[in-house]
Amino acid sequence: AIVTGRIIQQGDNLQISVELMDTSDKTQMWGEQYHRRASDLQAVQAEVARTVTQKLRVRLTGVQEQQLSKRATENEQAYQLYLTAVFHQRKQNLDGYKKALDYFDQAVALDPNFALAFASMPPVYANLAGTSGLDAKEAIAKGKAAAQKALQLDDTLAVAHSGMAIILRYEWDWSGAESEYKRAMWGFL
């Protein structure tokens, strides 16, 4: 099965369409539309995740259910900055990476315990290493510091482990990178 979705924002209002498709016959297993305020985005994400697991008849442990409903941050402005950073990061160009780091920095300035924002920085630093006037060693050091901070804040965050793995690859630490990638994979399952 695959989950697809679309979000349209008009001012502070969000229209969110989500559907769960069976990939074997391309039929819709479930679909829903949500009309919420932008400040409710994290709550909607948790609600959609719970509904999808129910529709797939997946049994979650208590810990998995807690992770599913856990908010990345209680600071909605920090979360919006994080989403803007991700938008720029996904452009996969020099300007986008620079803007992404700026927005991630703003997000963690508002919430110094925002593990997901810290965890999202290492791949950006790795992409900027040696390409933007940023010294490769400096970029990797900053990426490693961000990964370490993310792991310190939330060792269960898969993206924090994958970020650390990326940095360890740049340090030629193949066994360390492999270990972190494995931790990341188990975090996603």
Image (cartoon, rainbow, N blue to C red):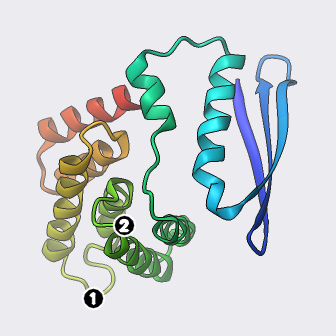
| Image location (x, y in percent) of residue 151 | 22, 47
Q: Pointer 1: what residue? A: 133
Quadrant of image for the C terminus: top left
Q: How far is the residue under mark 2 from the one under mark 1? A: 14 Å
Instruction: Give the residue furthest to the right.
Output: 27
What residue lies at 29% left-to-right and 61% top-to-bottom? Answer: 122
126 or 15: nearer the viewer: 15
Is residue 168 or residue 159 the one in the foreground? 159
Residue 105 appears in which quarter of the rendering?
Answer: bottom left
Q: Is residue 142 depicted above or below 118 in this figure?
A: below
Is residue 90 found left or right of 100 in the rendered image? right
Residue drawn at point x = 33 percent, y = 64 percent: 121
User: SS of the residue at dot 1?
Assistant: loop
The image position of residue 186, as x and y in percent, is: 35, 26
Residue 55: image quadrant is: top right
Residue depicted at 48% across the width and 25% down the height: 65
Amino acid under disc 1? Gly
Residue furthest bottom as drawn: 133
Q: Which residue is mark 2?
A: 124
Under mark 2, the amino acid is Val
